[in-house]
Image (cartoon, coloured by chain):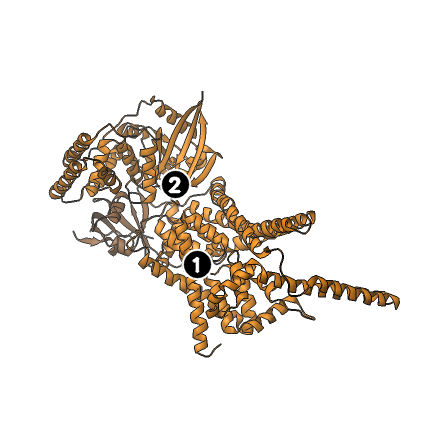
Amino acid sequence: MAVRKLNELRTGERGIIERITGAGRFRQRLMEMGFVPGTEIWVEKYAPLKDPIEYVLKGYHVSLRHEEAERVLVREQEEERRKD
Amino acid sequence: MAKEITIALAGNPNSGKTTIFNNLTGAHQKVGNWPGVTVEKKEGTATYDGYTIRVVDLPGTYSLTAYSQEEIIARNYIIEKKPDLVVNVIDASNLERNLYLASQLIDLGVKLVFALNMVDLAQSRGQIIDHEQLAILMGVPFVPTVGTKGRGTKELLEAIVRVAEDRESVTRHIHIDYGRELEEEIAKVQGTIRSARSSMDEHHPRWMATKLLENDEEVIKEIAKKPRKRIILDQLEQSTAHLKQILGDDPETLIADRRYGFIHGALTETLRHTRKDRRYFSDQVDQVLTNRLLGFPIFIFFIWAMFQLTFNLGRYPMTWIDAGVGVLAQFFGGLMGEGLLRGLIVDGIINGVGGVAVFLPNIFILFFCIALFEDTGYMARAAFIMDKVMHTLGLHGKSFIPMIMGFGCNVPAIMATRVLESRRDRILTILINPLISCSGRLPIYVLIAGAVFGARAGNVIFSLYIIGIALAILMGQIFKRTLFRGEIAPFVLELPPYRMPTLKGTVIHMWERGSIFIKKMGGVILIGSIVVWALSSFPQTVNYSKDYENQKLLIQEEYALKEAALLQTNQGEKVEIFTEEMDRKIAEVEILRKREFQEKSLLGRLGKTIAPVLRPLGFDWRGGVALLTGFVAKEIVVSTFGVLYQVEREEGEESEGLRAAIQDAMTPLIGYAFMIFVLIYTPCLATVAAIRRETGSWGWTGFSVGYGLALAWILAFIIYQGGRLLGLG
């Protein structure tokens, strides 16, 4: 299965978190917020100006900027577009 | 005998910690700051079962790593102040992530009670939590609560007392299992800590070992102070390298991963989802409020409504306060004879403080609106929508609120920076906020632009606002690249579900912030007003160039004769006209006297002293005095001009006279340079007080004032000298 960057997912697409690239504070923060390998995550929506992006994981909503979501690698799940 | 328990309240942001705190402590709260930082500290007391329970509200945090100020505060409080127990407020509808902080608290080995908050929301979402089983697994009692409805408060207090008295049967200390490889290394590091210890000291060695492997700066610093640090640090380096080699990742990542593993394990046994679909009401609301097309119009509407409420609704109580101040001034003025004390009380204290007190309604309404935005969860959405725009300016999405409020008044705007979590964003926003032209500066623009630009005044004033915004963007970029280089705050923003706010909660929220304005600003403004009053009233005896009192007497005599003549010729009805004329002439003499007094007062002398500095900008000493008084409040500049430029006029309204006088004294170029200066330098003393209060540092306050003055001078210089070179002046 293909590994993609989290910011490449479109609205409604899902993925399983594979790992977070880089190191340091940002990575640790994301881990604490539940961005740990094996976690399912999906794109709830993009902000009106396309950035940031709202994600849902572990039952809560969180938003990341493109430049931050880029550092999260996800394994693609079978495409499942949710109806809006 | 009064028994006392001290508890610390920990929890994630948006976990409803504040409502639990309010429920526990009621009205017995005091708000302050944590020592040396701008993070709010709240304390309150509850009484239960013969105990006085002191509740310390820790900052809301997702974790207890040493990455943010809030986390360090929370952790240090628990470790150093050793509260009797820690109550962790956990959002039941967001259980998995909330338990992360809980797992770290378990690691700390402190006595714990978990408040399982918002259980009603979890239930309505079809999440069934077996909290009794969860309590056994985690070794900590769980008390279900609904903060907004006050449910579970008594049970929570009961559990607190039970745990404090060691009567809670569930309580036991568990070790979170980090897996064989990690556990081995933890044990090794722990061993070196134990052996390096001179006495049994404060922290749990296992916790310290785990933290060291997590590469925790604070704990490493602590270890580096110990005499036998080498052994520990060597072991740490070895263990880290070993783990990286065999598990292929940093220990800190592995530990976070295992913590979530532990939580996941506990939840598989205790949490059931009865509903498959995960579309909640809150998500549907959000589809509208952050909609691609509707999001912005709705957002702009809310901001507009907040503005309208703040400045239009606030106008009514504002006029009442203004009138009240007037009455008070008159009352005290009438009570006392002409003299120094009357001047001090009426001109210095009542009018000075009153001039700021009129902003109170604005500030309270504004804080009410902001509290409403925060308590409903809309604030996070506003940040979500605006982040792209604000990010290009080097700011956070949430900086938008303070920036827009600056157009009204910089004081509440700077206080509104409290919505920003990162200190970097907060200080950056505070530093550029004064460049947003507040409403207090408008009268000056209207007066000067009206006088020297005539029909083009509107465009000129608009250009000032635009220049202010442009400078804010520019300075934001410069500060971001110089003062705050390297400190990047990631935009990991939680978007909590929308919630119905409670009136009580919102009012408490508003009051907490508003009362700080009253208390702290009051002191600074009081002192400032007295200083300006003193500078403009001393020295008391001035060597006047003319004998004004004699002039007044002469006028009176002249008119007494004229009136007598009228009465003799039976034209009594004309007496009134003469009396009016006489009063006007005396008032004119009085203005001249005041003008000379101002010129020779300490303030006037100061104005003349700084005149050489302002000469390259085209301003004379009067401009200097006006700018000096403008430091207290921009509104004062117009009245200072009134005194300094008032000319004797035979007929005509006074404002016309002032306008004409300014037209004579300033070229359009000087007028523009002056307005630019007014735009950029420190808005008012209350703003300075707010900056001091919110940054918690005289350094940043001084910097803000200093760079404002420097930038104002440079820009006014460029405009004046550049304009002259171009032949405009």
Q: Label 1: how many residues lie within 10 Å, few (<14), some (14-19) or many (20+)?
A: few
For the residue pair B109 and B280, the one nearer the viewer reads as: B109
Give the residue at mark 1. Answer: B297
Mark 1 — on which chain does it sit?
Answer: B
- Chain in orange colour: B
Q: Label 2: how many residues lie within 10 Å, few (<14), some (14-19) or many (20+)?
A: few
Is label 1 in a helix, a strand or a loop?
helix
For the residue pair A48 and B219, the one nearer the viewer reads as: B219
Identify the amino acid type marked 2: Pro
Question: Up-down: is B650 above or below B248?
Answer: below
Give the residue at mark 2. Answer: B35
Where does residue B463 sit, x and y in percent of width and height?
47, 68
Mark closest to the chain's N terminus, 1 or 2: 2
Gap in angstroms between the C-alphas marked 1 and 2: 42 Å
Identify the amino acid type marked 1: Pro
Mark 2 — on which chain does it sit?
Answer: B
Task: Residue B378: tell me if it is visible.
Answer: no
Closer to the camera: disc 1 or disc 2? 2
- Chain in brown colour: A
**Residue B309 disc label:** none
Q: Quadrant of the N terminus of chain B?
A: top left
> Left or right: where does residue B43 sit relative to residue B543?
left
> Left or right: where does residue B508 sit relative to residue B272?
right
Where does residue B518 sit, x and y in percent of width and height?
52, 45
Identify the residue at image location x=14%, y=37%: B235
Task: Residue B385: tell me if it is visible.
Answer: yes
Where does residue B433 sit, x and y in percent of width and height?
43, 57
